[in-house]
Image (spheres, rainbow, N blue to C red):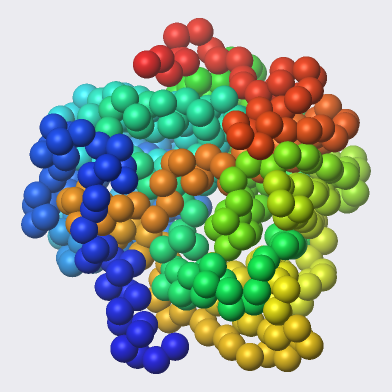
């Protein structure tokens, strides 16, 4: 991409185009309450684990004019480590907190960055909106399909800016190539392969254990039903220990690929889901769900998205460890979060590019610019919910052991067993309520 074009796209990504009020469904009153274009935005980060490092640079960037008001986590050691990390780039010290509810009560906090485990994403975002905060919520935007609809309802009522962490939608290269695909670069699109491979190792078998020092286990569980603490659950392995807190590899990493595929092919809800999945590796370890999944989503108009997910086999089936291959009547394209390659129908490479810009930085800046009224969010809930639903539909198919049809207008499952998993059980008193 030439420098002038990249500069133009970067400016577009960073939000120089002004927001149409109707596009966000915002009333004139709520629009007038948006923070001024030059005012400082006070943010709090809730959840200080692995994703935190990606937000240090954009928060420290003085061009964003952001103040980090709080660092919040249920584990004391995480709060201390996060404070030390930010002390190297900030001239002040943010407040440290373990209870997100106290942050919601602070009227000086404008926005929440939610980097928590999956089961907290929708409830935390909903509580924040009720408290008058804008929200950046990590993917997946919801723990189950019902929560995706809930998130939409809360945003509609409270008129808050919500950005979902599918950062490919703010990548300059992805914005460019998706627009070209929409304009016919590879002809009419008809199929996509969304893929991810990793070589994750063994995880401990869940055994009752003392709650680690410094961990607020009650707040970690939050909206989830109460259970006894098990060894090593709080730190990352909640992803693979049943469905109480996580959404498996589908919600962890396939979500990025499904979102890219849907975006490029301009698809909404599927009409049929087919899944084959099982645990193939380290059969005696603590991993309680599939580590290998092949899925097929059939959409109206004979469009198909296929998923190929391998959590514990790092073989690069398609030449890369992750991405999306889009097939069209005139060619094909490989897309990742920050790069692409385009091929003609004979398989000859005709176009490629890789971004020099950090997509998370762009995504965060787009969020802040949207709060100031300069832009619309690139990954709104209305789109993220549809992409995340693909993850949930695949998981539900695996859990009930059968394929099913889907209402392509609403995403609802035409299967009684499947609909039993549409939502979740909440700990009494913790379910978000409008």
Q: From what the image shows, is residue 218 above or below residue 321? A: above
- Tell me where residue 3 appears, x and y as whole percent: 35, 90
Q: From what the image shows, is residue 330 above or below residue 233? A: below
Q: Along the line of sight, which residue is nearer the eye, 259 or 72?
A: 259
Q: Along the line of sight, which residue is nearer the eye, 16 or 81?
A: 16
The image quarter containing residue 357 is bottom left
Res 38 visible: yes
- Tell me where residue 144 appears, x and y as whole percent: 60, 30
- Residue drawn where x is 30% and y is 79% of the image: 8
Q: From what the image shows, is residue 24 above or below residue 343? A: above
- Tell me where residue 182 appears, x and y as whole percent: 54, 68
In the picture, the quarter occupied by the C terminus is: top left
Q: From what the image shows, is residue 222 above or below residue 28? A: above
Q: Along the line of sight, which residue is nearer the eye, 400 or 30?
A: 30
- Tell me where residue 170 appears, x and y as whole percent: 41, 63
In the picture, the quarter occupied by the N terminus is: bottom left
Q: Along the line of sight, which residue is nearer the eye, 42 or 257?
A: 257
Residue 41 left/right relative to 383: left
The image quarter containing residue 212 is top right
- Residue drawn where x is 28% and y is 66% of the image: 14
Res 231 visible: no
Residue 280 left/right relative to 359: right
Residue 23 left/right relative to 409: left
- Residue drawn where x is 75% and y is 47% of the image: 297
- Residue drawn where x is 78% and y is 73% of the image: 318
């Amino acid at each position: 991409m030439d420098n002038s074009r990249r500069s133009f796209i970067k400016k577009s990504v960073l939000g120089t185009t002004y927001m149409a009020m109707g596009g966000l469904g915002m009333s004139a009153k709520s629009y007038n309450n948006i923070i001024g274009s030059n005012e400082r935005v006070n943010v709090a980060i809730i959840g200080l684990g692995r994703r935190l490092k990606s937000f240090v640079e954009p928060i420290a960037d003085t061009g964003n004019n952001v103040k980090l008001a709080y660092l919040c986590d249920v584990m004391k050691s995480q709060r201390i480590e996060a404070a030390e990390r930010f002390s190297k780039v900030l001239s002040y010290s943010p407040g440290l907190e373990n209870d997100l509810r106290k942050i919601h009560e602070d009227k000086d906090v404008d926005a929440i960055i939610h980097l928590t485990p999956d089961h907290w994403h929708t409830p935390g975002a909903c509580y924040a909106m009720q408290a008058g905060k804008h929200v950046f919520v990590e993917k997946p935007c919801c723990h189950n399909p019902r929560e995706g609809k809930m998130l939409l309802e809360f945003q509609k009522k409270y008129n808050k800016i919500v950005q979902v962490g599918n950062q490919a939608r703010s990548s300059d290269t992805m914005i460019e190539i998706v627009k070209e695909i929409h304009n016919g670069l590879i002809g009419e699109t008809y199929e996509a392969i969304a893929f991810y491979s990793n070589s994750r190792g063994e995880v401990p078998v869940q055994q009752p254990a003392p709650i680690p020092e410094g961990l607020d286990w009650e707040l970690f569980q939050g909206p989830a039903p109460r259970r006894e603490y098990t060894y090593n659950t709080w730190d990352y392995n909640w992803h693979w220990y049943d469905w109480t807190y996580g959404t498996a590899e589908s919600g962890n990493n396939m979500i990025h690929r499904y979102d890219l595929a849907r975006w490029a092919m301009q698809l909404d809800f599927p009409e049929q889901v087919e899944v084959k999945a099982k645990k193939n590796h380290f059969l005696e370890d603590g991993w309680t769900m599939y580590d290998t999944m092949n899925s097929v989503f059939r959409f109206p108009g004979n469009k198909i998205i296929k998923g190929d997910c391998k959590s514990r086999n790092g073989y690069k089936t398609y030449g890369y460890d992750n991405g999306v291959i889009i097939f069209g009547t005139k060619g094909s394209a490989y897309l990742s979060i920050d790069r692409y390659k385009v091929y003609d129908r004979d398989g000859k490479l005709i176009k490629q590019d890789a971004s020099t810009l950090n997509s998370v930085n762009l995504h965060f800046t787009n969020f802040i610019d949207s709060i100031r009224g300069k832009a619309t969010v690139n990954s709104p809930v209305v789109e993220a919910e549809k992409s995340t639903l693909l993850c949930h539909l695949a998981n539900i198919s695996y859990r009930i052991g059968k394929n099913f049809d889907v209402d392509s207008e609403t995403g609802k499952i035409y299967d009684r067993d499947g609909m039993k998993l549409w939502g979740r059980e909440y700990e009494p008193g913790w379910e978000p309520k409008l």
